[in-house]
């Protein structure tokens, strides 16, 4: 498997985890009492995933010479 396919697979996995965390956070916000510590940890993980997604997307987009 070449490097670009590995990046695409990793990107797909990160996006899926990001969506899953979004669903989990939505459910946690509806429960009482809320576990604020767990919510903060999940939100932090979600932000890390977003940063990784943007980084990989940048690697997959070819540089355009102006």
Image (cartoon, rainbow, N blue to C red):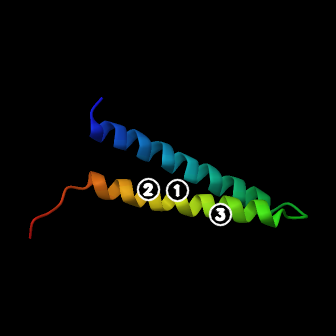
Count numbered badges in the picture.
Answer: 3
Question: Badge 3: few (under 14), some or many (20 or more) residues near its Cα, within 10 Å?
Answer: some
Q: Which residue is mark 2?
A: 53
Residue reaching furthest to the left: 66
Q: Which mark is residue 49?
A: 1
Helix, strand or loop status at disc 3: helix
Question: Badge 1: few (under 14), some or many (20 or more) residues near its Cα, within 10 Å?
Answer: some
Residue at the spot 50% in from the left edge and 48% down from the top edge: 14
Q: Residue 13: where, in percent of width, then height?
A: 49, 43
Helix, strand or loop status at disc 1: helix
C-alpha distance separating marks 3 and 1 = 10 Å
Q: Is residue 58 left or right of residue 13?
A: left
Helix, strand or loop status at disc 2: helix
Tell whether label 2 touches label 1 (CB within 8 Å). Answer: yes
Front position in the image: 26 or 43: 43
Sequence-earlier tag: 3 or 2? 3
Residue at the spot 62% in from the left edge and 63% down from the top edge: 44
Residue 64, image quadrant: bottom left
Q: Quadrant of the N terminus?
A: top left
Residue 6, image quadrant: top left
Tell whether label 2 touches label 3 (CB within 8 Å). Answer: no
Q: Is residue 33 left or right of residue 4?
A: right
Q: Is residue 55 left or right of residue 19?
A: left
Q: Residue 55: where, in percent of width, then height?
A: 38, 58
C-alpha distance separating marks 3 and 2 = 15 Å
Residue reaching furthest to the right: 33
Q: Which residue is mark 3?
A: 43
Question: Badge 2: few (under 14), some or many (20 or more) residues near its Cα, within 10 Å?
Answer: some
Residue at the spot 9% in from the left edge and 65% down from the top edge: 65
């Amino acid at each position: 498997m070449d490097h670009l396919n590995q990046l695409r697979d990793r990107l797909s996995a990160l996006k899926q985890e990001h969506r899953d965390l979004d669903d989990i956070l939505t459910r946690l916000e509806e429960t009482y009492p809320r576990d604020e510590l767990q919510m903060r940890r999940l939100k932090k993980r979600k932000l890390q995933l977003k940063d990784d997604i943007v980084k990989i997307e940048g690697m997959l987009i070819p540089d355009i010479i102006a």
